[in-house]
Image (cartoon, coloured by chain):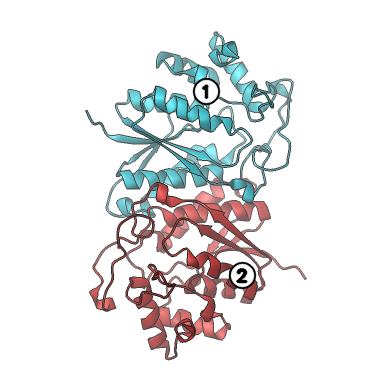
Chain colours: A cyan, B red
Amino acid sequence: MSHPKAVILASGGLDSTVTAAIAQADGLDLYLLTIDYGQRHAIEVTKASAIARWLKAKEHKILELDLRLFGGSALTGPIAVPRHTSLDDLQEGIPVTYVPARNTIFLSLAVAYAEVLQATRIYFGANILDYSGYPDCRPEFIEAFMNVARLGTKIGAEGAQIEILTPLIEMSKAEIILKGRDLDVPFHLTHSCYAPLENGQICGQCESCLFRQEGFQSAGFDDPACVQQ
Amino acid sequence: MSHPKAVILASGGLDSTVTAAIAQADGLDLYLLTIDYGQRHAIEVTKASAIARWLKAKEHKILELDLRLFGGSALTGPIAVPRHTSLDDLQEGIPVTYVPARNTIFLSLAVAYAEVLQATRIYFGANILDYSGYPDCRPEFIEAFMNVARLGTKIGAEGAQIEILTPLIEMSKAEIILKGRDLDVPFHLTHSCYAPLENGQICGQCESCLFRQEGFQSAGFDDPACVQQ
């Protein structure tokens, strides 16, 4: 049976996987899009493929786009990913792991994919609370981008309303994890670490690892990905 | 001597080359960005490199991004590029050469490049008159995109105003060509044809060829690119 289509920006991480599960629970067929952008943690691309299979996505596209050409981020350039002993260590402001215009680029690509599919729903795991430093996770950015999607596409010009749904945007990490547990999300397949060690183990000290650890602690159960390692 | 920086989306075509020359005449240093997106007329990427050298651009980045992964356009998929005997032949509406969300994607990438350069000016050769069928060439789209660039970037969040300048947007093709002549634009290096023949010659019948021919006729001089062929 065929359902309406949703495009999901699927990074292989925890947030985008919970977002995909929410789209599926909303009754939509999943079309996953993963961008292999030259990130240090390219292991997440492999994880995204496993997640796509687990979720029985209708399609999973992996697009190569090497943002190391521009650099300007700890995730794509020579700048080191900062390590911290706890979340209290994090500095104010936009962290060096911000990738210039990344979410603008990713949403543009999601819109292109959606337009070809004639899909009007894009699910995006942006979250403002944990990552308040990233400008391109804010609701006003998402709103502005929807306006661009409406004006800059054929389906938009023809009257379709492209929606960008961000169900996690105001959740805490613990709330995201609990929501994921309700939806049987395969946490063990997800990857969050920005700077995996050479042996593939997580670093445990980057901001993304710390937010994940703190999230599972607050949610009150063990991280299945860590249990497995 | 160093001037303020401008990022130019340089396709190797006539419009983007005139746009780059305008940015230079505005006193800016040129940082050219060409996207090799799997287009049929990939010859334009080579042309863009020659143009970058001619204009003495400070930098020319070529980014590979294979939009054939999505398809949905005569420029990237199996759909044939329509041929016409004259501009009167063109059908109403958005042509099949529209590439889904292409200008949204390209501007996103230009914003990323600009942000890394700490440049706040992006020049873009969009034109509404000749290509009125393309939704992502309209001034309201550009305006909406500037809002996204302001909200979705670190430099925007810190108060910089990223401008997207579209000096050609309301010019006719003849006016663009006359402006280019004033600025000594290397027309002979530019390429417009959407569906070049196997021997590299232009087809002379796609909409882009027809607009160019008509433009040079109205401007009253021969197209140096054709003279050379």
Above/below status of A67 relative to B129? above
Q: Which mark is residue A211?
A: none
Identify the residue at image location x=74%, y=20%.
Answer: A85
SS assignment at label 1: loop
| Vertical relation: A58 (above or below) A158 | above
Viewer-nearest residue: A204 or B144: A204
Q: Chain of mark 2?
A: B
Asked if labels 2 and 1 share a chain, the reply is no
Residue at 58% over, 46% down: A66
Q: Are marks 2 and 1 in contact (CB under 8 Å)?
A: no
Label 2 neighbourhood size at 10 Å, few (<14), some (14-19), many (20+)?
many
Q: Which residue is mark 2?
A: B52
What amino acid type is highlighted by mark number 2?
Answer: Ala
Who is closer to the viewer here, B46 or B120?
B46
Q: Is residue B146 visible?
A: no
Where is residue B79 shown, x and y percent of the image?
Answer: 30, 57
Residue A53 in the image, given as x and y percentages of width and height: 40, 25
**Residue B9 at what x, y percent from top left?**
54, 63
Pointer 1 chain? A
Q: Residue at x 31, y 41 (%)?
A: A119
Q: Residue A216 occupies which quadrant of the picture?
A: top right
> Image quadrant of residue A30?
top left
Does dot 2 land on a helix, a strand or a loop? helix
Q: Residue at x 59, y 31 (%)?
A: A131
The numbered disc on residue A190 is 1
